[in-house]
Image (cartoon, rainbow, N blue to C red):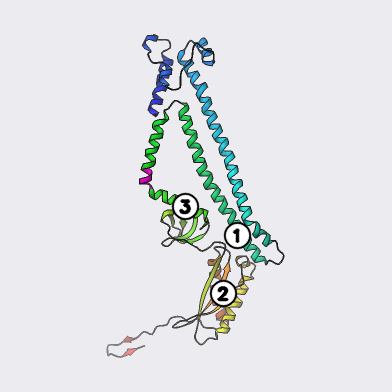
């Protein structure tokens, strides 16, 4: 089809160059070159007749007829496509924004109550922000699919305007669709999985997730792949269809969980009090209080290990802030336990060295 189009244009250019030559040598007219488009009607009235009367060139008249009748229509088609995309984009984004507003309406009413704690209010605001991010992502996906459909229709209409027979094109598209259906099942599965993951809000950009073999921070999500950067800086491109399970460590809120071991001779109530006081100090530190959503709590004795009594402390934090809080708590726990004279046990080993005489020294 493209070759036929260039062939018609070539005939048109040849006719333009041969207008001063013998017309008997020119058996192909521009109308024949642009089959299905038509040439200039020299017996009628119009812009092409006006051009022919002044130039005496049938080729130039045919070219004028072609561009006046088809290029204008092509420009109209493109203009309509741009207008439709503009209108649909505004409608999609406004519609998704209304969905987000209706979804957070009840939560906003709860946050406006006077008796709601400030940290609960902050948590509700965080959830509202995530709802807006989710609907914005869905709006991007819907608009991308809409844009593809509009431009596909526009291209088909333009091809029809320039005289290309669309029947082979439609037949070829059908054959291509069948081939893709058999050969690109994995890609289709990736797209479907991506749509469900985005619509269900399983994770978003900035979340810390565990995909099994790969884990890290989400940097980009498309309908086909999820891009994750791990703690070593490696960027993983994971096909959505290959994701069988997702562990989201930073959706809405996170939790720092610490197990601190003390010696068996230690008073566990005393040690628990030291750990809890230290955690409260950090929670009310001006540099760290924004990372906490709840007051820290000691869950009690978690384990009686071979060489230590393990005490568990848990803290609910803002999304993805649990790692920083956990590191700072470990640092402060070590200082506080040392100051209180509480021993933190560590593995010890006795080494026996044999002399030549068979006696062993320790």
Q: Which residue is mark 3?
A: 194
Looking at the picture, how far across and down is residue 180, in whole percent?
Answer: 38, 43
Q: Secondary structure at mark 1?
A: helix
Q: Mark 1 vs mark 2: which is more N-terminal?
A: 1
Splitting the image into 4 quarters, where does residue 269 fall? bottom right
Q: Which residue is mark 2?
A: 332
Q: CA distance from mark 3 to mark 1?
A: 22 Å
Q: Mark 3 vs mark 1: which is more N-terminal?
A: 1
Q: CA distance from mark 3 to mark 2?
A: 43 Å
Q: Residue at x 59, y 77 (%)?
A: 276
Q: Residue at x 53, y 32 (%)?
A: 78
User: Over which residues does the magenta segment extend?
Assistant: 179-184
Q: Which residue is mark 1?
A: 127
Q: Quadrant of the C terminus?
A: bottom left
Front-lying residue, 264 or 42: 42
Crowding near pointer 1: few (<14 within 10 Å), some, many (20+)?
some
Front-lying residue, 334 or 30: 30
Q: Mark 3 vs mark 2: which is more N-terminal?
A: 3
- Can residue 143 be seen here? The reply is yes
Q: Residue at x 51, y 87 (%)?
A: 265
Q: CA distance from mark 1 to mark 2?
A: 31 Å
Q: Main secondary structure of the magenta part?
A: helix
- Can residue 239 be seen here? The reply is no
């Amino acid at each position: 089809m493209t070759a036929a189009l260039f062939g018609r244009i070539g005939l048109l250019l040849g006719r333009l160059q041969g207008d001063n030559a013998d017309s008997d040598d020119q058996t192909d007219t521009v109308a024949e070159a642009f089959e299905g488009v038509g040439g200039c009607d020299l017996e009628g009235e119009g812009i092409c007749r006006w051009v022919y009367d002044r130039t005496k060139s049938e080729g130039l008249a045919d070219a004028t007829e072609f561009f006046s009748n088809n290029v204008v229509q092509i420009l109209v088609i493109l203009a309509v496509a741009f207008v439709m995309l503009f209108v649909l984009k505004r409608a999609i984004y406004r519609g998704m924004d209304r969905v987000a507003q209706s979804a957070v309406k009840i939560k906003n009413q709860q946050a406006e109550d006077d008796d709601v704690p400030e940290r609960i209010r902050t948590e509700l605001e965080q959830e509202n922000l995530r709802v807006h991010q989710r609907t914005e992502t869905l709006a991007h996906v819907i608009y991308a699919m809409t844009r593809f459909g509009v431009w596909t229709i526009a291209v088909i209409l333009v091809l029809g305007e320039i005289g290309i027979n669309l029947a082979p094109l439609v037949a070829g598209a059908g054959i291509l669709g069948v081939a893709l259906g058999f050969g690109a099942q994995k890609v289709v599965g990736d797209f479907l999985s991506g749509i469900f993951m985005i619509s269900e809000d399983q994770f978003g950009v900035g979340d810390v997730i565990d995909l099994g073999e790969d884990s890290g921070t989400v940097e980009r999500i498309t309908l086909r792949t999820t891009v994750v950067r791990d703690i070593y800086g490696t960027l993983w491109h994971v096909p959505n269809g290959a994701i069988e399970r997702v562990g989201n460590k930073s959706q809405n809120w996170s939790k720092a969980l610490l197990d601190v071991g003390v010696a068996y001779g230690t008073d566990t109530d005393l040690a628990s009090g030291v750990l809890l006081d230290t955690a409260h100090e950090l929670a009310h530190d001006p540099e760290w209080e924004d990372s906490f959503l709840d007051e820290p709590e000691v869950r009690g004795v978690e384990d009686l290990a071979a060489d230590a009594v393990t005490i568990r402390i848990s803290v609910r934090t803002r999304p993805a802030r649990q790692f920083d809080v956990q590191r700072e708590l470990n640092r402060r726990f070590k200082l506080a336990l040392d100051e209180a004279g509480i021993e933190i046990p560590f593995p010890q080993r006795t080494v026996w060295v044999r002399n030549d005489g068979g006696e062993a020294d320790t």
